[in-house]
Image (tube, coloured by chain):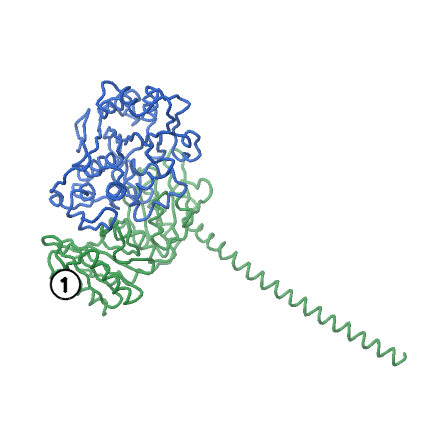
């Protein structure tokens, strides 16, 4: 073979090899991208699917002879209103994500509705449970009650309700058994809001302890004002409890910063007890004292206390707890 | 007292008579609103009860219900007969929507809806110009063209607004009900400014046959917390009608629980309907309440 031809062939082969290598690189690159995108898309889908599957798994397959009727229903923060009208706002006051609902039926028996609310975090599952809680533990989950025909409990980040169409000798144990089963399926437990640990325990009416973020919640438990005079908001954690013997209300609020706490204190004094000025204590009615004090980023407010000293005692108890 | 429309605080409720109904709901001491204010305006409301309006099955008897409504109308307008009273409010040219309520556990009874229709007929309103609706009011052709409305529903406690009564019933006149939820529905009376509704509600009938006086959880219904009150509250002022219903619920709660147990959340929308929105009268001392019929267990 003439050397010129060999050279041409060699150079042609080199070109082909280069082209092949380039193609192989492109193919590898495309394949890698494809794999990455598949992994990414799969991981996205699988997370949603995993969450869905996980929540569905919490529902019992059967409740003492009651069988699931129809598909699961699910409602998110916007859709909740189509399910429970204005009362959906109660959940939206917390970090509510979605609720899953399943109805169970049995021949010649009232139906049972099971709702599992994903509250985003355990603190808010606790908060929404405590919101309307009247006390009386039914022994299910981290706290529960069976009141007015409704079994409710919280555990981990879930708030769970079981509502029989009618409470009968047959539905009552079925609802309790189903609650236990759901609790077992949830398995994990969640932590309580840190702020409730600062509330004094002595003389506290246990069922009165509440955890919340918004002034609408405060008004639900203790009607203070039509407007938000304590500057409560989603970034604020607050606890409220009632104390014997004078049934004084103690409210502890954690703001993100000391400056916000300071502004909120001024707002409160100006709107509610302007007479108190900077001191922050005022007898608004005979033997009914109101007080407010700031400790760093915390505000401590006392309402309906029997005396000024009583206000001071409650405030000092909280401050001691905050320092520990 | 603050200017109407401003911030109202607990201290205002402790001071003033204007907020007597709500103060009572909040369990505040009765002496705090002993000082009665001069009536700026009064509203006439008729409470009528009948011992046998409900059958053993809990269904309202159509004939007794009709008689109750007719008697209430005569008393409300001080007329010789019911027909004249209906003609006080409605005429043959009217197109009338009856805003009912279909809430499953406690809907407006058929007997009430049908009695209202009969009353409208007696005033000359044509059958083809009457419609009954709740959740479909915005797409209902009669409601869209209505010159007048009758507003009727049962009274019940509510997980978010405290109570659901006549003031809340027009919530379906907005495509965005949640836009009225702020601050536990404090400004529900704004609903009554919706153009389709404004100044057209001529009669309010709050059904107190088996009111719900307490609830647990968002779904909120338990027959245990209803009782056979067998009443209707009839008036042209929805605020006065709801305020009267609320007083009865409060009394029933005291009777049932044996203590003051405030409705939560406090139904402050009833007070704000008067103070902020001037829709009517919420203070019981300014309501001209006429009681007819069965008196046993009347609670007010």
Disc 1 chain ID: A
Chain appearing in green on the rendered image: A
Chain coloured blue here: B
Q: Is residue B224 visible to the viewer in this orientation of the structure? A: no
Mark 1 neighbour class, 10 Å CA radius: few under 14, some 14 to 19, many 20 or more = few
Q: Quadrant of residue B161?
A: top left
Q: Residue furthest bottom?
A: A3
Q: Quadrant of the N terminus of chain A?
A: bottom right
Element type at mark 1: helix
Task: Say which residue label 1 marks.
Answer: A313
- Residue A294, compared with residue B203, is above or below; it is below
Q: Give x and y (percent) for residue B299.
A: 17, 33
Image point 11% across, 62% down: which residue? A309
Q: Residue at x 26, y 50 (%)?
A: A137
The residue depicted at 29 percent of the width and 29 percent of the height is B203
Residue at point 84% right, 77% down? A8
Residue A4 falls left or right of residue B159: right
Left or right: A51 with respect to A165? right
Residue B186 picture location, percent across and down: 29, 45
Residue A54, image quadrant: bottom left
């Amino acid at each position: 073979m003439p050397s010129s031809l060999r050279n041409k062939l060699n150079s042609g082969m080199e070109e082909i090899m280069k082209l092949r290598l380039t193609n192989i690189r492109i193919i590898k690159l495309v394949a890698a991208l494809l794999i990455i995108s598949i992994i990414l898309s799969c991981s996205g889908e699988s997370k949603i699917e995993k969450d869905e599957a996980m929540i569905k798994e919490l529902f019992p397959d059967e409740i003492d002879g009651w069988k699931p009727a129809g598909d699961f229903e699910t409602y998110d923060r916007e859709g909740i209103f189509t399910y429970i009208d204005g009362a959906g706002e109660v959940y939206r006051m917390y970090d509510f994500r979605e609720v899953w609902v399943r109805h169970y039926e049995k021949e010649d028996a009232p139906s049972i509705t099971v709702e599992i609310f994903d509250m985003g975090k355990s603190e808010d599952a606790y908060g929404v449970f405590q919101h309307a809680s009247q006390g009386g533990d039914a022994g299910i989950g981290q706290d529960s009650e069976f009141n007015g025909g409704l079994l409710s409990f919280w555990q981990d980040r879930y708030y769970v309700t079981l509502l029989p169409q009618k409470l009968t000798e047959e539905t009552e144990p079925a609802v309790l058994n189903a609650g236990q089963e759901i609790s077992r399926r949830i398995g994990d437990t969640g932590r309580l809001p840190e702020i409730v640990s600062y509330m004094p325990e002595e003389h506290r009416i246990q069922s009165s302890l509440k955890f919340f973020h918004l002034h609408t919640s405060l008004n639900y438990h203790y009607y203070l004002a039509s407007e938000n005079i304590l500057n409560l908001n989603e970034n604020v954690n607050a606890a409220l409890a009632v104390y014997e013997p004078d049934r004084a209300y103690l409210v502890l609020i954690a703001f993100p910063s000391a400056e916000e706490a300071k502004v909120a204190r001024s707002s409160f004094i100006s709107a509610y007890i302007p007479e108190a000025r900077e001191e922050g204590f005022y007898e608004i009615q005979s033997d009914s004292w109101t007080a407010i004090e700031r400790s760093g980023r915390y505000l401590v407010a006392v309402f309906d206390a029997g005396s000024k000293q009583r206000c001071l005692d409650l405030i000092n108890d909280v401050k001691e707890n905050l320092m520990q | 007292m603050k200017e109407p429309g401003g911030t109202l605080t607990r201290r205002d409720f402790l001071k003033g008579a204007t907020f007597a109904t709500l103060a009572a709901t909040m369990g505040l001491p009765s002496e705090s609103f002993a000082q009665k204010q001069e009536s700026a305006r009064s509203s006439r409301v008729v409470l009528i009860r009948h011992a046998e309006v409900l059958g053993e099955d809990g269904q309202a008897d159509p004939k007794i219900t009709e008689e109750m409504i007719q008697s209430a109308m005569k008393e409300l307008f001080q007329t010789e007969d019911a027909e004249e009273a209906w003609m006080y409010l409605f005429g043959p040219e009217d197109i009338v929507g009856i805003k009912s309520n279909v809430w499953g556990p406690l809907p407006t009874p058929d007997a009430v809806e049908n009695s209202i229709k009969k009353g409208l007929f007696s005033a000359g309103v044509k059958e083809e110009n009457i419609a009954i609706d709740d959740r479909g009011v915005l797409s209902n052709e009669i409601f869209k063209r209505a010159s007048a409305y009758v507003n009727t529903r049962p009274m019940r406690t509510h997980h978010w607004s405290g109570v659901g009564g006549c003031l809340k019933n027009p919530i379906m006149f907005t495509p965005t009900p949640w836009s009225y939820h702020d601050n536990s529905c404090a400004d529900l009376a704004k609903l009554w400014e919706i153009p389709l509704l404004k100044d057209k509600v001529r009669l309010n009938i709050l059904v107190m046959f088996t009111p719900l006086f307490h609830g647990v959880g968002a779904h909120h219904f338990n027959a245990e917390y209803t009782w056979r009150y067998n009443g209707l509250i009839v008036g042209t002022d929805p605020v006065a009608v709801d305020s009267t219903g609320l007083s009865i619920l409060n009394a029933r709660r005291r009777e049932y629980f044996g203590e003051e147990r405030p409705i939560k959340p406090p139904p402050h929308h009833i007070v704000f309907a008067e103070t902020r929105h001037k829709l009517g009268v919420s203070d019981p001392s300014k309501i001209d309440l006429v009681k007819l019929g069965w008196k046993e267990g009347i609670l007010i």
